[in-house]
Image (cartoon, coloured by chain):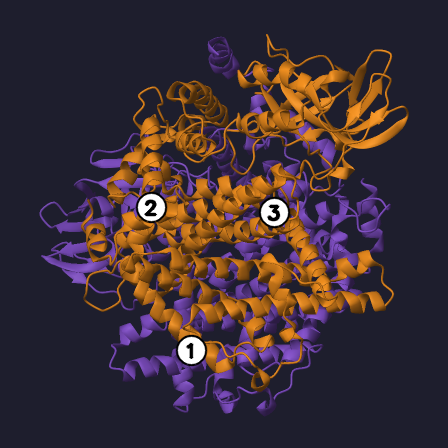
Chain colours: A purple, B orange
Amino acid sequence: MNPDIIRERQNAAFDPEILTNILDGSAEKTRRRREIESLVINDPDLQHEDLNFLSRSERYDAALKKSAQMILKIREHGISDPDEIYSYKRCLHRGRPEPLDLHLGMFLPTLLNQSSPAQLDAFFMPAWNLEIIGTYAQTELGHGTHIRGLETTATFHPSTQEFVLNSPTISSIKWWPGGLGKTSNHAVVLAQLYTQGKCYGLHAFITPIRCMKTHMPLPGVVVGDIGPKFGFDEVDNGYLKLENVRIPRENMLMKYAKVEPDGTYVKPPSDKLTYGTMVFIRSMIVGESAQALSKSCTIAIRYSAVRHQSELRPGEPEPQILDYQTQQYKLFPLLATAYAFRIVGQYINATHHRITGDINEGDFSGMPELHALSAGLKAFTTWVANAGIEVCRMACGGHGYSCCSGLPDIYVTFTPACTYEGENTVMMLQTARYLVKSYKHARAGQQLTGIMSYLNEPQHTIQAQSVSSRRFVVNINDLASLVEAYKLRAAKLVETTAKSIQVELQHSKSNEDAWNNSSIDLVRASDAHCHYVVVKLFAAKLSEIGDTAVHSVISTLALLYALHGIAQNSGDFLQAGLLSVPQMSQISRRLKGLLSEIRPNAVALVDAFDYRDEMLNSVLGRYDGNVYEHMFEWAKRSPLNHTEVHESFHKYLKPLQSKL
Amino acid sequence: MNPDIIRERQNAAFDPEILTNILDGSAEKTRRRREIESLVINDPDLQHEDLNFLSRSERYDAALKKSAQMILKIREHGISDPDEIYSYKRCLHRGRPEPLDLHLGMFLPTLLNQSSPAQLDAFFMPAWNLEIIGTYAQTELGHGTHIRGLETTATFHPSTQEFVLNSPTISSIKWWPGGLGKTSNHAVVLAQLYTQGKCYGLHAFITPIRCMKTHMPLPGVVVGDIGPKFGFDEVDNGYLKLENVRIPRENMLMKYAKVEPDGTYVKPPSDKLTYGTMVFIRSMIVGESAQALSKSCTIAIRYSAVRHQSELRPGEPEPQILDYQTQQYKLFPLLATAYAFRIVGQYINATHHRITGDINEGDFSGMPELHALSAGLKAFTTWVANAGIEVCRMACGGHGYSCCSGLPDIYVTFTPACTYEGENTVMMLQTARYLVKSYKHARAGQQLTGIMSYLNEPQHTIQAQSVSSRRFVVNINDLASLVEAYKLRAAKLVETTAKSIQVELQHSKSNEDAWNNSSIDLVRASDAHCHYVVVKLFAAKLSEIGDTAVHSVISTLALLYALHGIAQNSGDFLQAGLLSVPQMSQISRRLKGLLSEIRPNAVALVDAFDYRDEMLNSVLGRYDGNVYEHMFEWAKRSPLNHTEVHESFHKYLKPLQSKL
């Protein structure tokens, strides 16, 4: 064990185990998570290769091997709780995506939720036993977010009782679905339904694409891998071009909408029924943001504790780089953010469970707010985490660029979350739509409930631009007061934006143009709303923490999070008249004090995230801090070192020398 | 040609060719650059493979092949002007790094600048003819920025007239030098010189590492590739462990410092003599920031002109995504930044040439300012470009993640510039040191000249925190007035920081602690200084543009750049009392107006960067806008598509099915 990192752990003012239990939900949950992780790590059947040294085809191969093993192992161990399956999978694949993700996460749930009873009988068990391996084919080459624009067609022919599926244009080729390229033999294809000469919009069709025996593409099916991407090497994201592919009438998912044998179309009872999965996945992504940022902070902070560089005082030994104020200013706000997002992830997960319960009992009233919240928080947390991972990487200096740091991999694995399951700007605008609507309701006298209730309060009409006329005075050392400031900032931005849309409308712009011309402000208002929610939830969590030492250090983090956010957005708070110029200077000084307070607890705070070395997969982030010797060992395994002299020497350099 | 992109070009209000000439320096320079590019692109010997489909070893092989070809081709074509060689190389390697970069860019120049005449005779021609292939081995596993901390030793033994080189610890292993792993047979090794029992600090030693005939590592030399990184697949960054490696006394570079045969050490006349290369490379990096951002903007803006998505108005066809205000707000400020950085790159390049001329005539007076400027601007431009590339990538939606977009590659190729040749935070602090020193000189009555002269002006003593007491009123539509605002913001931050250091010192902190405790503010002051320089240079460039239409569009970009920077840093301008809250709202509105003004010229503005499709290497950024059909063609070439059924199906899925 590296002596620096031993000393860091000795100096911590709290017991990280208590904090780990809080993050997991309870001591029992920590125990069970560790048990599952051990099942994976200690299983001699489950060998982990360092993927950094493999080609893409080898990576896909290695991932598929594990995916296949997992199916058997989980049944063997009798793991059936979804959270536990998730833990097992995350540990086995070291947090990376895998070729069966869409089969397990989209294809099976879609069958469960949208099949008629007869379809369940026909398709579910074969899919459960992986005779049918499926994916979910929605996006097309020319169409992403706006699914109404999808071009794939499914035309019903009563004479043969078949749908004929077609990709009528280049831009209608299905593009991106995971597992589509090489792994799946079926896909749920989203297509425009045509029957009796009329288009009835998007519907889902179970479409066989490869022979279940030979795995060869079926007639009319052009299918393949879309090529290398930024990360996701293990997944065969695919393309699918359909040329008069015929499927039986029974392959349209018919729990809700139906096409009868004569071609008559039967409408679904509600169009909100497919809403739930999307909201669930966006909620999950909030948790992923927290994970990615927690891992990155663990690596960067542990490394900063063992890395020595430059000099603070002449003649003294090189200090740990964690002692530099600039390094603390890069990493500690991100550490605070990782904790904030963990807490937000827990909250939104719990909210989702609660509202799903309500929906199952026929109460849909919580859905719009959850929808707006999950959209905005998905965008807010992924953007922040995405940038934060890179800050962590660059805070590790040159070695952060080496794949052995694990950070490049965390980045490329995480960054797609900014775009998939709802492009972030579009998500922010969806939340903004709900905010503006809520604001209008409040102005019309309707009493808002839940997280939007702050828009009821009439106090923040825009006048108070000078500091003197402020009614509310922020106490920068009081978290509750800062939550209030975030609330008023959000309220102010929502109000300003709603009014500016009104002004645009008065200049006889159409609703749509007024909206587009205000969209910069709308995104800003959504961002402020989400920021408020995060600060509020972080503050609220403190009351649940019983241990004094842990309470103290988490309170410091929460204060750092809130004040740092204000410093980064000082213009907003000054413009809203919520804070004065002298207060901004106080905040700058206070922030420096908080960095010093966190410094002795920094390593213990990342230890509390409790990532095993196998999960972090980072030489720089090793628990024992023995970085350099393991970097050297790792490097020796580079494929370029398989021979002392690379063949290119004989091919190019030797002949060149003879010509000069 | 895609009809959307044809229409964009027809609607442009200016002739991009005129702008291209301005960016190149003259019409003649444009002509010559294109001529050189054609020499590469039309040369049937120089085949370009799509590196995305190759393994790392194959990429290294392909790059080394081109590097070897280049040596011959350049001599064949008689290209000898350094700028022209650079153009040739950039085009041949498509802007990527290559294994001989350090031989050409560091090893040969070091020989030229630091060899004694006898050493030049012995080493230069063999190196010029690639019998000697060299690299520059400075950084170690445990030591980067702080070169005084390097641990490698070179001990002189008069008995054998040899230096004995050693890597005494794990952390002293040389790490990162490009071309060290497999390509080079020599290295300039930076080591602590010991002679007559005393350490004389860092000196440079020409060290043979591989046999010049067999290319096998020499006795005592442990050398290899450091393994996969975030990008830079084509380069064999290497490690080097030296175990009692003996080299003749004549291999220490002895133009300045010397060790005599009896071991007597002779001091160099000045220690500023090796300064120049570093400043030159940092200046170059400013230009690289401009290039990387220009390319990214070209791709994202062209794609946004042909991509249609969602709906602005119900019933109408899907609009070009470039019509969304949020998309414009992401891309147009970056486009303006790319132009700004081009101009800054030209300026710093010219300044470097001027000051190098002065130095050659013995006048070193311009060096400190150039040193501070190049350090700060290197950090400022690389950070901004680094984040900007990712904004461009994410503005392309899902397809931005595909390697066919070219954007992942631009990012991983560029991002190391934030760390190499001076870690950015360290660079900012170097500039800050110069700023604080200049401020003190000015306060002491010394008249500053050059770019720092603004610190002479006494007007910005900190009092004016309320808007009413401002003496200077910014006109947000007048670029000169905005330059003034940036200047005062920088002056204010330098002053505040210098004073806060004084306060720390009064609290009996040491100089070093006072500095460290102010380093967040110091970085912020440097950042503001660099921002001011960029706005100032952008504004100054306008007077050189004769063509009215081009002048108009570039003026709009400059105004956008300046106002966007204020909006992003509104807290600074409000805190300094330079702008009022109502002015901030005006700026938000004006920014939207500027986005609309730039919209019709956006495609022409990126066309003016004049990247051939071969250089962009992006399906999304194609000049003809025919994106989708070429994505499909590209994807078919994915290695995973070499067989219809991947072998993993038979290895894992088939057996799994039989077990379930």
Q: Are marks 2 and 1 in contact (CB under 8 Å)?
A: no
Q: In the rendered image of this protein, does residue A70 appear above or below residue B553?
A: above
Please rate how many residues cluster around mark 3, counting C-alpha atoms within 10 Å: few if below 14, some from 14 to 19, many from 20.
many
Q: Do the residues at discs 3 and 2 belong to one chain?
A: no
| Residue positioned most to the front | B361
Mark 1 — residue?
B586
Q: Position of residue A535 (x, y in %)?
A: 60, 71
* Residue nearest the viewer, comparing A441 with B296: B296
Q: Which label was assigned to residue B146? A: none
Does the rendering let one see residue B225? no
Q: Answer with left or right where residue B209 lies relative to residue B164.
A: left
For mark 2, give the secondary structure.
Answer: helix
Mark 3 — residue?
A393
Q: In the rendered image of this protein, does residue B114 appear above or below residue B288?
A: above
Mark 2 — residue?
B21
Question: What is the three-letter code of the residue carrying label 1?
Answer: Gln
Q: In the rendered image of this protein, does residue B45 appear above or below residue A587?
A: above
For marks 2 and 1, give the one nearer the viewer.
2
Q: Position of residue A404 (x, y in %)?
A: 62, 36
* Residue nearest the viewer, comparing B407 with B86: B86
Q: Name which residue lies at 47% across and 10% down.
A: A655
Q: In the rendered image of this protein, does residue B125 appear above or below residue B634?
A: above
Looking at the rendered image, the quarter that the C terminus of chain B falls into is: top left
For mark 3, give the secondary structure.
Answer: helix
Chain letter belonging to callout 3 = A
